[in-house]
Amino acid sequence: MMRRIAVVPGSFDPVTLGHLDVIDRAAGLFDELHVLVVHNPDKSALLPISQRVSLLEQAITEAGLPTNIVVASWSMGLLVDYCMDVGASVLVKGIRSQVDVAYETPMAIVNRNLAAVETVFLLPDPANAHVSSSLVRQVAGLGGDVSPYVPRAVAQYLERSRV
């Protein structure tokens, strides 16, 4: 029997409770789930990739998420190249609104055409539907409390570093 392997890509800059919700639910759908921190050239990153990976690993552990989760990073080449390297046939994307669907749909079609990698969209828990990494960065940058929106490790890191 083939193992069902999926990838949840994102910039995770920083990881939010919404991300963890999607990761947790996706981990229940697949035998192995790779949470992949990727470089997005269209965004100006707050945290270096290595810090995002570390915070993701801490958040996943603290939340007690399933053990079938692998955290990695990818900054060179196409996302489908990573999928092929690890044997993943599915990408999982969390979507909050129609704007996300419009942005993700063309990429999903191209990924399917390039490498037969399908994309599955997961809706967020309504409690987290308004939360985005960019919102967290903005609130943190202005000195606000981000603890309702991010895992404890992220809130502590942002508080310590005064990002």
Image (cartoon, rainbow, N blue to C red):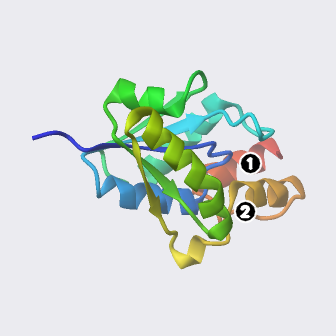
Question: Which residue carries the number 2 mark?
Answer: 146
Question: Farthest residue toward the left?
Answer: 1
> What residue sits 56% from the left and 55% below the top?
105
Q: In the image, is residue 134 above or below residue 86? A: below
Q: Residue at x 76, y 51 (%)?
A: 159
Task: Determine which residue is flagged by label 1.
Answer: 158
Instruction: Name which quarter of the figure residue 133 lies in.
Output: bottom right
Q: Nearer the viewer, residue 32 or 42?
A: 42
In the rendered image of this protein, does residue 86 appear above or below residue 95? Answer: above
Point out the residue furthest to the top here.
Answer: 76
Q: CA distance from mark 2 to mark 1?
A: 9 Å
- List the single residue furthest toward the bottom: 126
**Residue 109's spot in the image, x, y percent?**
50, 47
Amino acid under label 2?
A: Val
Q: Picture coordinates of residue 130 (x, y %)?
A: 67, 71
Q: Amino acid at mark 1?
A: Leu
Q: Is residue 108 above or below residue 127?
A: above
